[in-house]
Image (cartoon, helix red, strand yellow):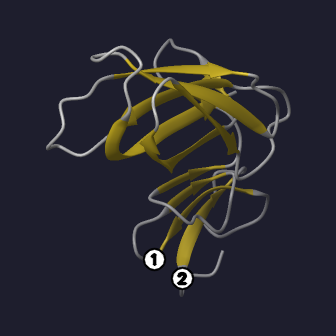
Amino acid sequence: GNTETGFGINEDGGINGYGTTRMYFKAGGNVGVGTNNPVAKLDIAGSIKVGGGTVFNSMQGGQATIGVGAGGVKTFTITFPSAFAAPPVVVATAFGDLAYNDTFDVTVKQVSTTQFVVNIYRTDSAGAAWGQNLKLNWYAFQ
């Protein structure tokens, strides 16, 4: 590894020595596992498992602006930043301005490797319109 930008631990246990770098500590605090160029505080190239839980091979997340609703069900399509190898599990939730007490039901459907569809329905006033600038947070796991 390059000692000016960080240092790596190699498969032979050496530091900046022979073999493939398995863990890299970049100047500035980013740590890479399986990558020599971590772009986040913890950047893992490969799957992760926390405790005795599920193994995840890929995760993505984002936020989309849904906007105002005319009432009934509003359907919105979200495209993943990068395609998954197989359709992932998607979790989505709607949120709006704090000044409103509206509640919403969000249903995820038609999940593919590149996108998913959500239906959003106002539940506190069954199917009524909403005037706030609604947003959608989503996370996809594979």
Mark 1: which secondary structure?
loop
Tag 2 residue: 5
Which quarter of the figure is the C terminus placed in? top right
* Identity, as a three-letter code, of the amino acid under mark 1: Ala
Question: What residue occupies the far right of the structure in this picture?
Answer: 85
The Cα–Cα distance between marks 1 and 2, rounded to whole angstroms, is 5 Å
- At x 76%, y 22%, the residue is 110
Q: Position of residue 127 (x, y in %)?
A: 42, 19
- At x 72%, y 26%, the residue is 88
- Residue toward you, 115 or 7: 115
Which quarter of the figure is the N terminus placed in? bottom right
Q: Where is residue 27 in the image (x, y as percent from the top left)?
A: 45, 77
Mark 2: which secondary structure?
loop
Question: What is the crowding at mark 2: few (fewer than 14 residues within 10 Å), some, or many (at least 20)?
Answer: few
Residue 43 appears left or right of 78: left
Tag 1 residue: 27
- Residues marked 1 and 2 touching at CB (< 8 Å): yes
Disc ID at residue 9? none
Q: Position of residue 86 (x, y in %)?
A: 84, 27
Question: What is the crowding at mark 1: few (fewer than 14 residues within 10 Å), some, or many (at least 20)?
Answer: few
Q: Where is residue 3 in the image (x, y as percent from the top left)?
A: 56, 82
* Identity, as a three-letter code, of the amino acid under mark 2: Thr
Residue 108, quarter of picture:
top right
Q: Is residue 108 above or below residue 74?
A: above
Residue 4, quarter of picture:
bottom right
In primary-sequence order, the first of circles 1 and 2 is 2
- Asked if one can make out residue 51 in the rendered structure from this viewpoint, the answer is yes
Question: What residue occupies the far left of the structure in this picture?
Answer: 99
